[in-house]
Image (cartoon, helix red, strand yellow):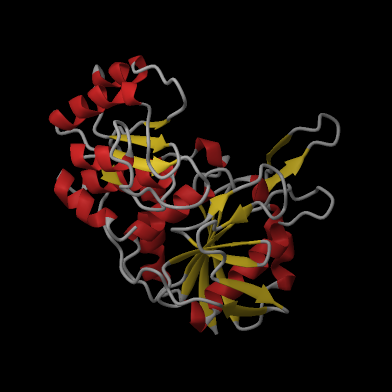
Amino acid sequence: MKTILVIHTGGTIAMQKNQQTGGVSLSAANPLSAWDHSLPEGIDVITEHFLGIPSPHMTPAHMVELYHFLSKRMKETNAYGAVITHGTDTLEETAFVLDLLHADRDTPIVITGAMRSSNELISDGPHNFISALRTALSDASRGRGVLAVMNDEIHEAREVTKTHTTNLAAFSSPNSGPVGAIRNNSVIFHHPPHQTKSLFTVTRLNKTVPLLKTYSGMDPAILQYFLSQPIDGLVLEAMGAGNVPPALTNDIRAFIERDIPVTLASRCPSGAVQPIYSYEGGGKYLEDLGVILCGSLNGVKARLIIMAALESGAATDEIQYIMRDF
């Protein structure tokens, strides 16, 4: 008998649709409790509730608090693994923060959610929940850090992202594909683990790191505004493989001269930023200025890893070293 710690944080998976108004909101009682009879064999579930909020209300500070709550309860219960139910809008961000902090890589942590509320036709919440439990129970999940399970697919926290607003198949890993799947109640992995250790030990995540998407003809006044603000870092979602309009380069240089790290992600859904173009605003030009390239991480995850690195006291050159693995 294996013990699995289940932590419900809120989200659509814990919501119901009002048949009169059409609005969807959190239920008084978690609807997943009605599915206790469908739990996999050989499992003892310990259930906890944390926050109980829609996922757009989740903050990086909440994510760190969730990790420390999870870690504490895992030790107290001697659980084999954990399942976290979560809203889908920020599921990838919470999964990524947990993965950055999760020290015991042999303890599976699985996060899941739902695209439809519990009383909608063909609600996906119960199925995703049971699939997440099966994944957390599997010995093959050990050493993989934090996993996201949605729609019978298993994704790494580093890679997974929400790619559709409403479709049941809303999650994908554009650069790598899912690492596994649940087939006929069996957990199957296709790829070896990508990362084998946690990166940070932090107790908070409160650094101010804005995220800006670049676009053609972008007014540098936007960057100049942030130059006047007490920010700790800046992430730019660049065009293509890491290129920005030339009008931005003077202000980017000003951030770097103030020792405020500037990190470059791509606004493309797949691929990595690379130091290719040496023209003004090109990826090579920006790297030579001191801009940090974050590989294939998307903007929201680049922001979170910069926040964690800054909280841990990392200098810009140390952050550049960390990003080489991404």
Q: Position of residue 276 (x, y in %)?
A: 33, 47
| Nearer-the-camera pick, 275 or 66 | 275
| Nearer-the-camera pick, 116 or 72 | 116
The quarter of the rendered structure image containing the N terminus is: bottom right
- Note whether 36 is above or below 312 in the view shown: below
The quarter of the rendered structure image containing the C terminus is: bottom left
Q: Position of residue 70 (x, y in %)?
A: 41, 60
| Nearer-the-camera pick, 251 or 24 | 251
Image point (54%, 80%), residue name:
138
Q: Is residue 318 left or right of residue 136?
A: left
Residue 209: name its quadrant: top left
Q: Position of residue 12 (x, y in %)?
A: 66, 46
Q: Is residue 218 left or right of residue 29?
A: left
Q: Position of residue 221 (x, y in %)?
A: 34, 14
- Note whether 197 is above or below 267 in the view shown: below
Tell me if I can see residue 201 in this picture. Answer: no
Image point (30%, 61%), residue name:
325
What is the total number of numbered labels drawn onto the structure image?
0
Residue 263: name its quadrant: top left
- Note whether 185 is above or below 240 in the view shown: below
Tell me if I can see residue 45 in this picture. Answer: yes
Q: Is residue 20 left or right of residue 229?
A: right
Image point (28%, 36%), residue name:
207
